[in-house]
Image: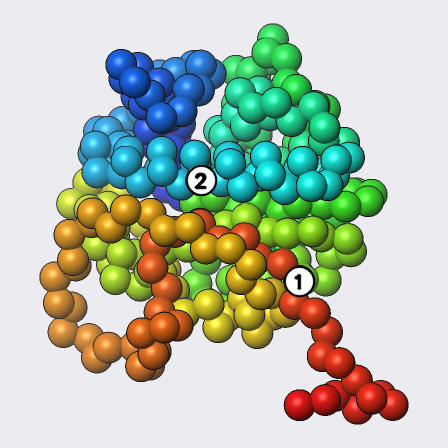
Amino acid sequence: MGVAGEIQATALVAAACRAEETRQPAPRLTDPYAERFLDSLDAAGRALLAAGRDEVVHRTTLIDGLLLDEVRRHPGATVVNLGAGLCTRPYRLDLSACREYVEVDAPEILARKATVLGGAEPSCPVRRIPGDVRGLPALGVDGPAVLVTEGLLVYLPPAELAGLAATLGGLPAVTGWLADVVSADSARAMAAVAGRARAGLALHGLESMDTVERAGWAVADYRLLPARRPAARPTGRPPGPSVPASRRVLDGVVLLRPAAPPRTVTGQAVS
Ligand SMILES: C[S@@+](CC[C@H](N)C(=O)[O-])C[C@H]1O[C@@H](n2cnc3c(N)ncnc32)[C@H](O)[C@@H]1O
């Protein structure tokens, strides 16, 4: 396994979104480090930046807020960011209450990040583990952990997402998992933008949260992103399995918690 080059390149697009936001007169977030990565942004990356800045900035600020809350609730926790890309959260946020901040991504991404951020001072110890989340490397985390996946799940087909959710569900002492979620319609619209930009990305949205819920997670908080993306053109494909409106995924950020195990009476599940 290994993360495809065109998927790794999206890390640069996300950094470019935060760099551009930082240059605005009233930025919604400030990432003074993002600019440092931008020398290799190509035409496809610039097209994706133009289409996606608002969404990336929104999801990043939502995850920032929820993560700071979670760390306040669990001082001494380790943050594990899977598909961390060029995110600089431990450098731009005060995460000094954390035991450490662990980042997993492709070796090329993490090596570049280590070089570019070499002289910068994080607010808590940072440890980087090169690897592929589809075969999650050992994290070596002790004690409570908060998981973060930002901009990652959309690159995982359903079976791979189910596998990751099950693996994460089996980790000990996880307090929560913060993730952005993208609807199937939005993923199709994003794929159309990526196609026009010749970025060569296959994107996978969610019809519902069934896949992660079946792996033992429960949605504890759900913050919506503003819905601005134009609807995808009809594909001619039949619609996916029908999902009740109340269960349909809308683009947003979720806080997942390990679902409580079913109550049992003398070893039998209570329905
Ligand atoms: C859109 S970027 C988001 C990066 C970062 N989380 C952020 O918000 O700035 C997606 C990231 O996920 C990483 N990624 C995608 N699939 C992965 C996999 N199977 N294993 C590890 N990393 C993966 C890519 O290399 C890339 O850095």
Amino acid type at circle 1 is Pro
Query: What is the quadrant of residue 199 in the picture?
Result: top left
Q: Secondary structure at mark 2?
A: helix
Q: Residue at (31%, 40%) from the top-left corner? A: 55
Q: Residue at (20%, 47%) from the top-left corner? A: 228
On the rendered structure, is 181 left or right of 229? right
On the rendered structure, is 188 left or right of 250? left
Front residue of 255 and 130? 255
Ligand 1 within 8 Å of disc 2? The answer is: no
Q: Secondary structure at mark 1?
A: strand
Q: How is the image coloured?
A: rainbow
Residue identified by numbered label 1: 258
Residue 206 position, x and y percent, is 38, 64
Q: Evaluate whether residue 141 shows in this view.
A: yes
56 lies above or below 40: below
94 lies above or below 225: above
Residue identified by numbered label 2: 62
184 lies above or below 8: below
Q: Evaluate whether residue 38 shows in this view.
A: no
Ligand 1 within 8 Å of disc 1? The answer is: no
Residue 110 position, x and y percent, is 57, 30
93 lies above or below 225: above
Of marks 2 and 1, which one's residue comes earlier in the chain? 2
Q: Quadrant of the C terminus?
A: bottom right
